[in-house]
Image (cartoon, rainbow, N blue to C red):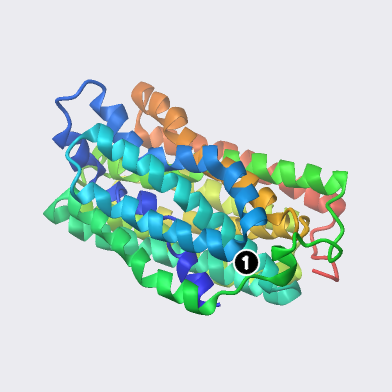
């Protein structure tokens, strides 16, 4: 369990190691044409290649085993991450970030599949909540350290990827391949029904839309702070870290919340709290107000990740779980990659603060839709949840 949870903590290292130093990186390559867009692509390039490789990775996880894919992916992920320490060309950096994205897809899909394979019932909900907490707290730790390292130089923060090498021996020693997964899961669980596949598809699309909004935190917060007169990259790291700190505590409570509320009711709460946090962020006038808004908004992603993971895992049999999670991983990171394509045009026309505000309003609209559905279907968790 500890190996699975610690590995899950690597989930958002790819953007969090870059985000605080992004303005400095942009300044170093300001002489290049389209430097603003290209520098942001250093943040988002892994996300695109996670999205592109997700279906293939999902097939590999089902075909070659979760453990094997995880070990190979973690090793290559660490190598691709630290390579930026010695790369001088922005193009070379973008290529290394693309390669890193492919192997991060392997890590996320295989480790989440192992959660579904190793655990069932209420214990599965508990581990899913812990997994979300480790993702959030891991991001918090990495982004704060990255902010401090960015004070030295933006490139130094990429040394954080070396943490991956410490986890590979734990994977080799402690993880095992579930027998039914290795044999394709035949005869153990029935395949998903058409209705279950439809729900999985809806959850994937919902994930895409949600991540367009939530990825504004690492990609736009530092620019929001500059807009209100806070130019210290360490404070940018602290603000993004506060969002993840709040998310971590929300994830820890997922098991208890899931015992009481249905998934639809949880989604209503997620979008209501997240929307309120984004509106507050848009109205923030100083660093303190930004930190308070981040603390409120963080509860959204803290509940969102375990809720979507369990929505997929509970409907996908072991034989196809890797592919279902691979599809979700694709839409998850495609949403993150698309986030600047959504936010930057609005920022250029208005401001970063207004972009957060308008995003918060449509998140609140989604919350109302889920609340209405939950009231009709029933907001309490089923007896078997």
Q: Which residue is located at x 58 percent, y 59 percent?
A: 110
Q: Is residue 99 above or below residue 142?
A: above
Image quadrant occupied by the N terminus: bottom right
Residue where numbered disc 1 is placed: 114
> Where's residue 350, x and y in %?
37, 25
> Where's residue 313, x and y in %?
71, 59
Q: Nearer the viewer, residue 223 or 112?
A: 112
Q: Nearer the viewer, residue 33 or 237?
A: 33
Q: Is residue 106 above or below residue 67?
A: above
Rendered image quadrant of residue 257: bottom right
Q: Which residue is located at x 71 percent, y 67 percent?
A: 258
> Where's residue 165, x and y in %?
35, 67
Relative placement, left or right, of 12 versus 201 is left
**Is residue 162 among what the camera can see?**
yes
Q: Which residue is located at x 18 percent, y 42 percent?
A: 24
Rendered image quadrant of residue 331: top right
Q: Is residue 184 above or below residue 125?
A: above
> Where's residue 285, x and y in %?
31, 45
Relative placement, left or right, of 114 versus 132 is right
Q: How many marks?
A: 1
Relative placement, left or right, of 69 versus 381 is left
Task: Label 1, secondary structure: give it.
Answer: helix
């Amino acid at each position: 369990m500890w190996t699975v949870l610690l590995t899950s903590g690597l989930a958002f290292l790819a953007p969090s190691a870059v985000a605080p130093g992004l303005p400095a990186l942009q300044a170093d390559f300001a002489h290049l044409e389209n430097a603003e867009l290209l520098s942001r692509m250093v943040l988002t390039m892994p996300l695109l290649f996670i999205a592109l490789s997700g279906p293939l990775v999902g097939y590999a996880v089902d075909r070659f085993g979760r453990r094997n894919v995880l070990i190979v992916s973690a090793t290559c992920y660490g190598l691709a991450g630290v390579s930026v320490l010695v790369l001088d060309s922005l193009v070379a950096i973008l290529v290394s970030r693309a390669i890193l994205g492919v192997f991060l897809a392997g890590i996320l899909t295989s480790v989440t599949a192992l959660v579904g394979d190793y655990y069932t019932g209420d214990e599965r909900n508990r581990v899913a909540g812990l997994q979300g907490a480790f993702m959030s707290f891991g991001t918090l730790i990495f982004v704060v350290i990255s902010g401090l390292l960015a004070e030295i130089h933006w490139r130094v923060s990429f040394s954080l990827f070396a943490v991956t090498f410490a986890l590979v021996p734990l994977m080799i020693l402690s993880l095992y391949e579930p027998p039914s997964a290795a044999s394709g899961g035949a005869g153990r669980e029935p395949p998903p029904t058409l209705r279950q596949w439809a729900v999985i598809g809806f959850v994937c699309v919902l994930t895409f839309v949600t991540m367009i909004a939530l990825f504004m935190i690492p990609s736009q917060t530092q620019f929001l702070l500059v807009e209100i007169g806070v130019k210290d990259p360490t404070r940018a790291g602290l603000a993004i870290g506060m969002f993840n700190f709040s998310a971590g505590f929300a994830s820890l409570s997922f098991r208890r919340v899931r015992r009481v509320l249905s998934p639809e009711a949880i989604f209503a709460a997620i979008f209501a709290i997240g929307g309120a946090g984004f509106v507050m962020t848009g109205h923030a006038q100083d660093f303190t107000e930004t930190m308070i808004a981040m603390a409120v908004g963080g509860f959204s992603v803290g509940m969102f990740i375990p809720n979507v993971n369990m929505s997929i895992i509970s409907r996908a049999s072991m034989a196809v779980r890797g592919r279902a999670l691979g599809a979700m991983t694709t839409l998850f990171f495609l949403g993150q990659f698309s986030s600047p394509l959504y936010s930057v045009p609005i920022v250029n026309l208005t401001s970063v603060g207004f972009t957060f505000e308008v995003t918060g309003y449509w998140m609140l609209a989604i919350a109302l839709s889920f609340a209405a559905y939950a009231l009709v279907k029933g907001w309490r968790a089923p007896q078997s949840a």
